Amino acid sequence: MNKKNIFGNYLVNVVNLVLPIATLPVLTRILDKKSFGEYSIFLVWLVFASVIVDFGMSSFGTREISSGVHETSQWFWSSLLVRAFLAVVLSVIIAFGVLRPFQMNAILVMAFAIACSSYITQIFWASNGLQNTHIITPIFLISKILSTLLSILIAFLTKDLSITLLAFSFSLLIPSTLSFYHFIKATAIKLPEKQSFGLVRKIVSLGWSISLVNLAGILFNGSLILVTQWYFGTSEAAGISIADRVSRAILGLAAPFTVSMLPFVTQGFAIGRDEGVRRIVDKGKWLLTAYCFVGSLVIILARRILSIFGPQFEDYSLQLQLLTVWGFFSLTNNLIGIQYFIGSGASKTYSAIFFMSCFLLILLYTFMPKLLSLNGVVLSILFGEASFTVFSMSWILVKWKRR
């Protein structure tokens, strides 16, 4: 594995984790609890948008570029065209069909469109495939930190939800665009020509199944806040959002390693199945051990951690503890689902198992919140994630016994 690439990913992910968490205590004091709940729901729809625009490139795109089968510039520009088309269509649909709960105005529509544009130029899937993320790390970090601080200052001065969301969208667009431009210059990717878009059909054929899985994956990301809002209102969604953010921040500490692992594991599977599995086990056991250690501290200190964001969020400590357990299964499923299934080219199996877990999660959402209130929402997502682990391991064990 390329150590510079791992370090570059680590710095980027640390900043992407630390900045939102560090700015949350400010936002929770600038916005009232209901407005912060609306802010959180808006961000959920942005997660939905990012998954659609990504179109699976963060997994199969990284794999294809690292394999070197196709010319890098041709794959690069073809993927950009697909992402741009999806971003435009999605901006129109979401902005005019989903933002009504926010009493939709021109500023919110603009904020959503700007955020979608930032996902078009998101370049880390390509830099990880080429294992040269370190070349764009400095420009990304500097622009990300400065633009985020500026957005918080604007929020503090205006104390307006719409303006806050607009400023946040620009804090996504600026570092993404600058990194994109720097990556093209540094890697000497050819400017687009007619033949540069020749892989669009291949990308669509490869991406749709993984993209559907990623869309279903929103059930394991944004649904927690949306279901809470549906059953218990926007204010409770704000509290669950804080617990969710903290748990994902802990989980995100492993992201630089799991992202950098995929090319390494893919190359292992190219040698042989045993080699691919060995690479997953060697790296994965350390990740899971480290997560257990950090997760244990979060479980013990949950109430104190939440008090940082304001006394109104301290009562969500049990939900944070449950979500920390969920994070263990989520990391395990990354090692099984992304590293094993995607790395070995078994994306259809990954899709089938994932949809089974999603169906179970939807079923749990229909009655668990009614039985156990807020804990029912969190337990639903925990059981849904655990079911993926059980289904995947069962499939793998059956396959290995047949060998």
Image (cartoon, rainbow, N blue to C red):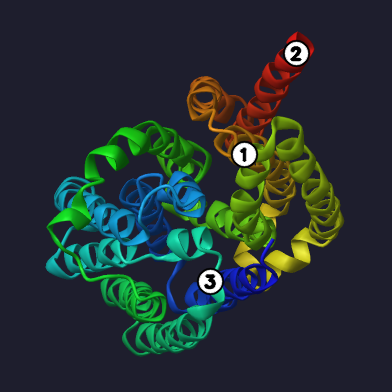
Mark closer to the chain start, 2 or 1: 1
Q: In this view, does 144 lie to the left or right of 196?
A: right
Residue 153 x, y percent position in the rendering:
41, 89
User: Which of 134/231 is in front?
Assistant: 134
Residue receiving disc 1? 270
The dot on residue 133 is 3
Residue under the image location 75 percent in, 13 percent down: 403
Residue 119 in the image: state x and y as whole percent.
33, 61
Q: Are marks 1 and 3 in contact (CB under 8 Å)?
A: no
The quarter in which the N terminus is drawn is bottom right
Horizontal side of 197 relative to 331 (left or right) equals left
Q: Which of 96 and 192 is in front in this view?
A: 192
Q: Specify the quadrant of the image occupied by residue 108.
A: bottom left
Q: What residue type is labelled 3?
A: Thr
Q: Name the residue that disc number 2 marks.
A: 403
| Nearer-N-terminus badge (1/3) | 3
Query: Which residue corresponds to the image point at 56% horizontal and 30% vertical from the top-left?
Result: 369
Q: Residue at x 49, y 42 (%)?
A: 228
Label 1, secondary structure: give it.
Answer: helix
Mark in front: 1 vs 3: 1
